[in-house]
Amino acid sequence: MAGPPLVVGRGGGGPPLKAAPAWASPGRLLAFFCTICLFIYLDRGMIASNGVNGSAAAEGHPASGIQGDFALTLFEDGLLPAAFMIGLLASSPIFAEASKHHNAFRLIGIGLAVWTVAAAGCGLAPGFGTLLVCRAAVGVGEASFVALAAPFIDDNAPPQHKTLWLGLFYCCIPTGYAFGYIFGGLVGGALGWRAAFLLEAAAMLPFVAFCLRAPPISLCGVGAISGGGGGASAAPRPGAGAGPRPPLAARLRAGAAAAAADLRVLLRHAVYVWTVGGMTAYTAVLGAFAFYGPRAGQEVFGISPERADLTFGAITVVTGTLGTLAGGLLLDRVGASMRNALLLCAGGIAVGSALAIVAFAASTTFTLFALTFAAAELAMFGSQAPSNAVCLWSVPPGLRPFAMSMSVVAIHVLGDVPSPPLLGALQGRLQNWRLSMSLASGLLLLGSAAYLAGSMVAAAATDYREVAEGGQGEDGGGSRGGSAGNRGLPAGDDQEQGRRQGSEVADDEEEADRVPSPDRPLLPSGAARSG
């Protein structure tokens, strides 16, 4: 796939732009990150598959998979995704903060190396305790990719197709899950669940080696290939690299203080806050649908568990892929402004809420329910790419990794982690799946309201894409074009707007930069930094 030549570094006060390595064309980068995303989410689907997760022994059915080998109760089995989530959520902000001082591409490689070792550890685990630790470590390894991959895609996508490229990336999530169910079922059934983990670890090894050894690229506004400059927040601190290394406790305090300063900056950006609020409501409802949807369909319509699982799984994969791509393509067609993105999100999940309520409350047959529910999820998934794009565009370039990591923390901690038990408690009280699922679907309207509120403030808010693109154009490396061409503003007006936005970036990054933080290389000299 052809694309404009990549540029690296810079983005608000960093060193001059440098040409990217020959391997790093935009199309290759997109394909590279999409492939990794498929493998990462294959793991999530695989561990939930019958071939890998298995079941405890029951009358007429021998024990199988992880549950059978370790004689797990359902509660113990449920600790596996919980451990994974703890590792992911705790580590994602850490990798985001580290990207201000170390090369982000190398950090992805380090995270994937942890992921690979942990996945192999799952396949070799001698007991449940070891398996639990390894699942937490898989979450730690995935955290680097979750925080850093989307900003790379946003940096290098063609300006007129940014949201579509993000859509292509995010549609790998449901596709990876689906491949995981299939892979886990086939390999787990034929070779055993341990072989499934070992094979996925082996498949990830070439990507790890490439990320750690290939000439690296950098995120715009976060840090150059040297792991140093690239924005105020990424500039080397006074005394960094000189004198004795600070004690661990001091470095931890400095890191926590830097993260707190970055969080304060994020909370000052109303568009970002409203967007994450909408994403949290959307994720909460999707989590409830994924956990209780098949059971509700089975009990309401009197179908077999196998049919319910297959139908809900197929609907999620197909609508997740098509809806995510459609949302990205539609936003690029109508004009990829933050306001348009949030209006699209607000409309999509409002329509999804109405259709889901109709599906659960009024459908008389399972076929009619499946068609209506598929239309609801198609509309809901249309918000996936635009909402994540706004998270990237509404904050200073140097804070994009931290913004993505905090959005992941919010949507899980406040979204799909508490929603299934809360819905279970509601159903326990009401004893009416139609009513319970309809009420859960109505929660999407809160998300729609949050997106609508964000769209109202987006028109006057800074779109930080224009800051980064304007900076590139000034230094002669601007393959993406200046903001005047993108928005159709007169050159003089656009330059004045650019100066105002640049001042806002400096103010935001100055607050994040007040807290000193050590700048230590993670890899040997020459691998991730230059003299």
Image: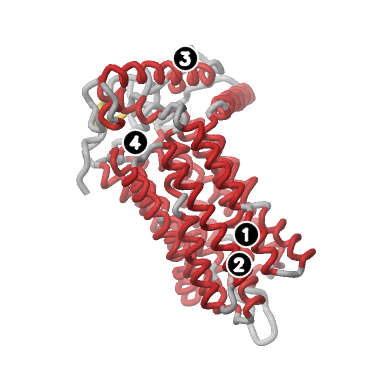
- Any mark on residue 242, and which? 3
For marks 4 and 2, give the CA distance. 37 Å
| Quadrant in which residue 531 is drawn | top left
For marks 3 and 4, give the CA distance. 32 Å
Q: Earlier in the sequence, mark 2 or mark 3?
A: 3
Foreground residue among 518 and 79: 79
Classed neighbour count for the residue bearing mark 2: other residues with Cα under 10 Å, few (<14), some (14–19), many (≥20): some
- Any mark on residue 116, and which? none
Badge 2 amino acid: Gly
Badge 1 amino acid: Ala
Q: Position of residue 333 (x, y in %)?
A: 31, 46
- Which type of secondary structure does the marked residue at label 2 adopt? helix
Where 302 falls versus 239 (above or below)? below
Q: Are marks 2 and 3 in contact (CB under 8 Å)?
A: no
Q: Which residue is mark 4?
A: 155
Q: Which residue is mark 1?
A: 288
- Which type of secondary structure does the marked residue at label 3 adopt? loop
Q: Earlier in the sequence, mark 4 or mark 1?
A: 4
Q: Are marks 4 and 1 in contact (CB under 8 Å)?
A: no
Specify whether 24 is left or right of 129: left
Q: Position of residue 313 (x, y in %)?
A: 51, 69
Of the two numbered discs 1 and 3 in the rendering, the one whose residue sits closer to the viewer: 1
Where 436 falls versus 30 (above or below)? below
For marks 4 and 1, give the CA distance. 34 Å
Q: Earlier in the sequence, mark 1 or mark 3?
A: 3
Q: Residue furthest bottom?
A: 60
Badge 3 amino acid: Ala
Name the residue: 44% across, 53% down. Answer: 382
